[in-house]
Amino acid sequence: MDNELGQLIHNTLEAESNEFDLAARVMARLPAPSSGGTPRGWRLFWVPALATAGALALFLTLSGHDNSITNDCAIDQLDVTGASATVLKLNETGTTVVWLNEASEEEEL
Amino acid sequence: MESDDRQLVRQVQGGDQRAFRTLVERYQRKVFAMALGMLRERGAAEDLTQEVFLKAYRHLGNFQGASSFYTWLYRITTNLCIDQLRKSRRFVEVELEDQAFEGSAEMVAQPLGFDPARAFADREIRERVLRALDMLSPNHRAAILLREAEGLSYEEIAETMGCSLGTVMSRLFHARKRMQAELSVLVEPAAAEEGR
Amino acid sequence: MSHWVPLALACWLSVNARAEAPTDTARCVLRLIHALPEAGPPDPRLADIHRLHLSKPPFSVWRSFRLLADETRELRPRQQLEFSFPEGQKASLLYTEHLTDPSGKHRVRGTLHVQGAHSGAGTGFSLDEGGLFMVAGQRLGKGILIYALSCRTED
């Protein structure tokens, strides 16, 4: 929520949906569950395979994954008040900086 | 929450209906809020919320987990709402401005001029907000509800609505602008009181 | 030769298992730095960031840097934390989610709001795990403020 209008919409719908409960009605309308669920053969293959993979994943994790830190940063959204903003990508490190250019005291007057 | 959702989805896929009930209880108010904002009528929103969960249950077997469960659920909700609005033809579908958006004007949120918390206590304000939402086209309405009521990121909205990030920003920009204009009338009584 | 097949399968599965089930808690470090026009003694707590960033443009026009605060917090997905700094600035960090891209790179998505005396900014970002993201430029006295954020999801 990043503005008063958004807060107003959010509050309106939260107040309107506060007491809402139809879980029982939905559940009553579900089809009866089919017997069996996931086929047993699937489990026979995947459970040991995943256990092996899990052990290996743990080993890889403990042995220090992702040692090379990269710095890519995507700005998904930017809301600024009281300033203009520039998004900079620094040359050597690739670090992203949001630079706020506030108006000077004189300009504000 | 998301990893917990994934676990519940797997349980439902394995035939566990109790896990589905947990998902319904977790998201029913959010889905209903979205449906109410889209359709405005409480009865229609209730029916649609049920339909969303029944459809989700029927199709959960095909859910691969490429997106999160809630964005998938909101996609079902948005599509059903837009279908229903199109059938009822309660709007004029003109959204040429979706292509005419140029970026940074969207970034600055305008102050509304009164306390948004008043919506909790004042039913008339809530009615006014719902009426203002009703003035928007279905796509603009869905975008602003997904953003403000459900708290989705721009990317999640793009994924949910099947459109580009630029289109999401455009829809939000125009929806906010229109809502601000529709709701400006709410500021006047407060301003008048202050002036006394 | 055939014994390599299960090993290769296990490796492939392990990579995918990590991609499918990332650790969701994020450990985030938010530092607030005051950049000043006057020369001053170097702050040893800023040695790394000074060498990599603060000694270079656009920060190099400032002649000294002072660490005002250094906060480390753990967040669950969709958790928001508020920060209050000694000079009265406020910031909030919403950690939205932990992403793993197809190449296996871990990323952290969130929103950082900073509120200064004259301006405020809310930035939604998706940042490489361990990478640095900065918001700079709000005025404080004769200098400016620099917020530097870094998050990790796995140690």
Image: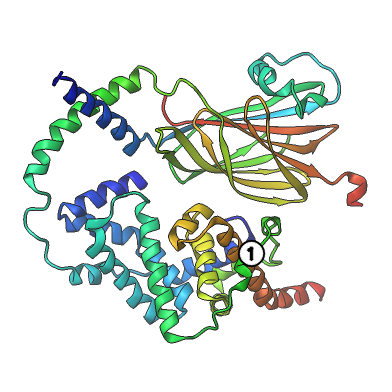
- Which residue is located at x 40 percent, y 79 percent? B84
Quadrant position of residue C7 = top left
Please name the amino acid that badge 1 sits on: Phe
Q: Position of residue A76 (x, y in %)?
A: 57, 48
Vertically, is A17 above or below A35?
below
Which coloring applies here?
rainbow
In the rendered view of the protein, which quadrant contains the C terminus of chain B? bottom right
Residue furthest to the front:
C1
Binning the other alpha carbons within 10 Å of mark 1 as few (below 14), some (14 to 19) or many (20 upward) gives many
Q: Position of residue C80 (x, y in %)?
A: 52, 44
Q: Position of residue B139 (x, y in %)?
A: 51, 70
Instruction: Give the residue pinned by disc 1.
Output: B173
- Which residue is located at x 28 percent, y 51 percent? B64
The chain ID associated with circle 1 is B
Does residue B66 appear anywhere in the picture? yes
- Which residue is located at x 65 percent, y 73 percent? B178
Q: Nearer the viewer, residue C80 or C155?
A: C155
Q: Count every numbered label the image shows and give the total.
A: 1
Answer with left or right where residue A51 lies relative to residue B191: left
Does residue B124 appear anywhere in the picture? no
Q: Helix, strand, or loop for circle 1? A: helix
Quadrant position of residue A62 = top left
Answer with left or right where residue B68 lies relative to residue C127: left
Q: Position of residue B149 (x, y in %)?
A: 50, 63
Q: Nearer the viewer, residue A11 or B193?
A: A11
Answer with left or right where residue C70 lies relative to residue C141: left
